[in-house]
Image (cartoon, grey):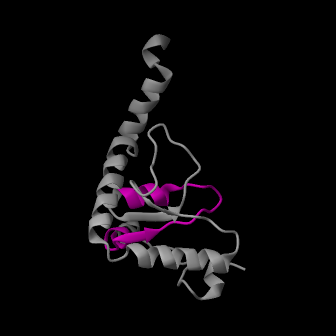
């Protein structure tokens, strides 16, 4: 059983194209849900942060060099293997936060700042250079 078959949350498998339409979807919604797929984190998570939307997702176990902090950079909820229970957890968390403008602004600004400090190609290269101390390799 999958979340989309339960009917508690309207989930579509349709790809939003072109990319501009997809990014407009992210920026026109104050809260964007991202669920784990083949991996725990994906481009969608980073794109949501870049769009200054609130990332709503299961609590991350993956650690980054500069951590993504639950309920500071993104709103987290507990993952449950049962799709019905998971749907209820997501709906409850969404209903808890959806009208809390102060919290949503706080999270979206912190997430957006994290993106600019960690999520761009230039910042990725800069962090990598620091971690491997590239100057010692010359």
Q: Is residue 18 magenta?
A: no
Q: Left or right? Give the position of 93 relative to 84.
A: left
Question: Residue pushed farthest right?
Answer: 1
Q: Position of residue 15 (x, y in %)?
A: 51, 74
**Quarter placement of the N terminus:** bottom right
Whether residue 138 is visible here, answered yes or no, is: no
Q: Position of residue 39 (x, y in %)?
A: 63, 55
**Quarter assignment of residue 66:** top left
Q: Residue at x 39, y 31 (%)?
A: 126
Q: Residue at x 37, y 44 (%)?
A: 120
Q: Is residue 105 above or below residue 10?
A: above
Whether residue 129 is visible here, answered yes or no, is: yes
Q: Which residues are magenta?
A: 24-49
Q: Position of residue 3 (x, y in %)?
A: 63, 79
**Quarter assignment of residue 5:** bottom right
Q: Is residue 99 above or below residue 73?
A: below
Identify which residue, 72 or 130, lies in the foreground.
72
Q: Residue at x 45, y 48 (%)?
A: 68
Q: How many marks?
A: 0
Q: Left or right? Give the position of 61 relative to 18.
A: right
Identify which residue, 69 or 115, lies in the foreground.
69
């Amino acid at each position: 059983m999958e979340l989309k078959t339960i009917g508690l949350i309207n989930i579509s498998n349709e790809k939003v194209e072109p990319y501009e339409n997809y990014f407009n979807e992210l920026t026109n919604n104050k809260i964007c849900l991202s669920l784990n797929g083949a991996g725990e984190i994906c481009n969608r998570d980073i794109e949501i942060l870049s769009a200054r939307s609130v990332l709503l997702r299961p609590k991350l176990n993956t650690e980054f060099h500069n951590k993504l902090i639950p309920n500071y950079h993104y709103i987290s909820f507990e993952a449950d293997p049962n799709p019905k229970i998971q749907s209820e957890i997501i709906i409850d968390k969404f209903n808890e936060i959806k009208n809390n403008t102060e919290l949503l602004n706080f999270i979206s600004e912190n997430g957006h700042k994290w993106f600019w400090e960690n999520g761009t190609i230039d910042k990725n290269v800069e962090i990598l250079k620091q971690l491997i101390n590239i100057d010692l390799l010359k």
